[in-house]
Image (cartoon, rainbow, N blue to C red):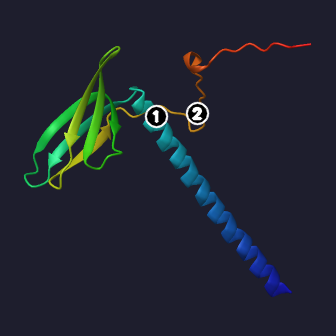
Amino acid sequence: MKMNKKVIITTLLVSGLFLLSGCESTKSSQVSYNVSQEADNFNVIRRVAVINTRTDKIEFEVIGRISVDTNDSDKLVIIVEADKGVYKKHLINMTEWNMYVVEDLEGAQVNQYKYEVNYMPETIIPFTITENK
């Protein structure tokens, strides 16, 4: 009977540790997502550098309020907010001889619990409900 209690207590402790470590991973993932959202909304100062891996020379560098799209492995898409309401788009062809680094220079003040829902009123089609008697 004593052995069963020890096994149960040990199992519960180990399970609790796994649950706690899982919470940190989730918290980290949420903060990472929120920082990325802030950067994509041009609220974070970033530096993007494209480096030639053969020569170790920087081929392209941009610093500012930047959104980076890395969905396509063959190209890097950088959108910069150059001035209020003025945006510039840069496309960089990625080859086996270059790499890029994205650095958040000032960091972002984000809330790990940030949640936002946006409704776009221009996409909602108005309608009228009538009743026939």
- Seen in the image, is 31 located left or right of residue 84? right
Label 1: few (<14), some or many (≥20) within 10 Å? some
State left or right for residue 48 relative to residue 26.
Answer: left
Occupied quadrant, residue 13: bottom right
Residue 81, image x and y in percent? 31, 22
| Residue in view at x 40 percent, y 26 percent | 43
| Tag 2 near tag 1, CB within 8 Å | yes
Residue 38 or residue 17, whichever sits in front: 38
Residue 18 sits in quarter: bottom right
Comes first in the chain, label 2 or label 1? 1
Vertical order, 7 against 29 (above or below): below
Percent x, y for residue 49? Answer: 21, 40
Outermost residue on the left side: it is 55
Distance in Å between CA atoms under marks 2 and 1: 10 Å
Percent x, y of residue 9: 76, 74
Frontmost of labels 2 and 1 is 1
Q: Which residue is mark 2?
A: 114
Q: Residue furthest front?
A: 133
Q: Is residue 6 above or below residue 73?
A: below
Is 5 or 121 nearer to us in this picture?
A: 121
Give the SS element for disc 2.
Answer: loop
Q: Find residue 37 and name its label.
A: 1
Tell me what residue is drawn at x 27 percent, y 41 percent. 76
* Residue located farthest toward the right when viewing the structure as drawn: 133
State whether residue 80 is above or below residue 56.
Answer: above
Looking at the picture, which amino acid does disc 1 mark?
Answer: Gln
In this rendering, the answer to whether 98 lies above or below 109 is below
